[in-house]
């Protein structure tokens, strides 16, 4: 899932492909082997089916935008379909997804730093904070200045850097399997019913990029080529996810950690490179992810539009995400909750429902209507079961 709202006026087909691959292939790559371990080998079928469904959802968003060229953002599609209330509902899901993803980035930062520098904590008087929570606060402190930037263009992430990080991460895992003699000999399990909902939720998170697709499309010079962008980006991203899942599962089987970097051999140079690579995600993406939420709050009242209020609002937002991250420091299960709850809504349900409302041609009974209805049923089922499963796991770990 990575939500990276880039505004590149007149971007080329190639540049848009890079941006799309960047937002699709990111943090999800770290936990994809764990997802496979939860569902077993047969859950790979679900990964590929989800990729096809999510690709089709991107096509539906493209068709919705063709109806009215003035549409630029995801909430605009909700407004076109259901008016002001549609915009509000879609915005709530978008901002909640971004907020929870920001929380997950802090958890990732804490876990990564703890792997690099274990057995370290913070003690203030009688109060002792363990290493992971301390590192979450340190990550937040490093991120803080970037959140004060008001120009979204200044936060634009260099897509090639994101792609390079993904390539380096896969390379480090292969290095561990071959050069560090971890091997690829684990057989795993064929199917694991108990963990299947978690696997599906994590797979869904990997494709939670639809909130960005309208922005990417509106930035293109030739918007009619956007379906080709979707085809290229989903194909390459799914190939990367599948490769990482298979490699990680063959290496560690059911013992793989929630983050593949935490399973790699300690004190190895490739492990350190992999962990430093994962640190790129929270340090470079957090500000861009929290920006739309901060901007919405600042636009709500003229009193919030001053520079001082902007800094206060963005600092408070960061503090709240730190509190949530410390309270629920379980990276994979927070990710699963995002995928099952907000991810299913923004990636599957909202595109289907808005398309049916905007495109009156659906009233002609045909294969497209049947497919969309089936996808809605699958989406609701995945959302309900996945949300229940992830919340249950989070509650169990909080006790």
Image (tube, rainbow, N blue to C red):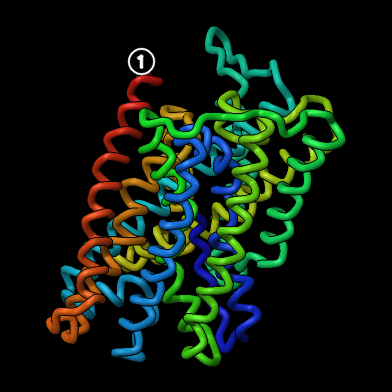
Q: Please state which of residues 185 and 304 is positioned toward the viewer in this rendering.
A: 185
Residue 24 position by quadrant = bottom right
Answer above or below: position of 265 versus 63: above
Residue 385 position by quadrant = top left
| Residue depicted at 62% across the width and 21% down the height | 131
Q: In the rendering, at what x and y percent does residue 291 appear?
A: 47, 60
Q: How many marks?
A: 1
Q: In the rendering, at what x and y percent does residue 253 appear?
A: 60, 28
**Residue 179 appears left or right of 68:** right
Residue picked out by circle 1:
399
Answer above or below: position of 258 versus 55: above
Q: In the rendering, at what x and y percent does residue 55 appear?
A: 43, 68
| Residue depicted at 71% across the width and 66% down the height | 160
Q: Please state which of residues 160 and 72 is positioned toward the viewer in this rendering.
A: 160
Q: In the rendering, at what x and y percent does residue 126 appear?
A: 54, 7
SS for callout 1: loop
Residue 182 visible, this orientation: yes
**Residue 332 appears left or right of 376:** right
Quarter of the C terminus within the rendering: top left
């Amino acid at each position: 899932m990575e939500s990276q709202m880039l505004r590149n006026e007149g971007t080329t087909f190639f540049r848009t492909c890079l941006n799309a691959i960047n937002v699709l292939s990111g943090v999800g790559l770290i936990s994809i082997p764990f997802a496979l371990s939860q569902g077993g080998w047969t859950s790979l079928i679900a990964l590929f089916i989800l990729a096809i469904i999510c690709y089709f959802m991107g096509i539906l968003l493209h068709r919705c935008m063709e109806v009215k060229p003035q549409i630029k953002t995801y909430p605009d599609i909700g407004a076109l379909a259901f008016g002001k209330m549609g915009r509000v509902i879609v915005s709530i899901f978008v901002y909640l997804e971004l907020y929870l993803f920001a929380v997950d980035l802090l958890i990732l930062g804490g876990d990564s730093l703890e792997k690099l520098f274990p057995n370290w904590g913070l003690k203030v008087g009688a109060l002792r904070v363990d290493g992971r929570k301390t590192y979450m606060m340190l990550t937040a402190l490093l991120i803080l200045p970037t959140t004060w930037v008001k120009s979204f263009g200044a936060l634009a992430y260099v897509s090639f850097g994101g792609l390079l990080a993904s390539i380096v991460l896969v390379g480090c895992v292969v290095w561990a399997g071959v050069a560090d003699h971890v091997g690829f000999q684990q057989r795993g399990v064929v199917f694991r019913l108990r963990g299947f909902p978690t696997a599906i939720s994590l797979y869904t998170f990997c494709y939670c990029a639809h909130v960005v697709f309208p922005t990417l499309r509106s930035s293109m010079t030739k918007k009619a080529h956007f379906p080709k962008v979707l085809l290229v980006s989903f194909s390459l991203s799914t190939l990367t996810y599948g490769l990482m899942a298979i490699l990680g599962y063959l290496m560690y089987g059911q013992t793989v950690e929630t983050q593949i970097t935490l399973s790699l051999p300690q004190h190895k140079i490739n492990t350190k490179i992999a962990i430093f690579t994962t640190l790129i995600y929270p340090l470079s993406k957090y500000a861009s992810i929290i920006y739309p939420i901060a901007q919405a709050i600042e636009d709500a009242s003229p009193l919030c539009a001053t520079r001082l209020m902007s800094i206060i609002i963005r600092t408070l937002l960061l503090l709240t995400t730190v509190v949530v991250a410390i309270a629920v420091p379980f990276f994979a299960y927070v990710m699963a909750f995002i995928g099952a709850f907000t991810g299913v809504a923004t990636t599957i349900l909202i595109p289907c429902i808005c398309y049916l409302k905007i495109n009156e041609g659906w009233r002609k009974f045909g294969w497209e209507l049947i497919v969309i209805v089936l996808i809605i049923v699958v989406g609701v089922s995945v959302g309900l079961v996945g949300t229940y499963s992830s919340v249950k796991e989070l509650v169990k770990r909080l006790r």
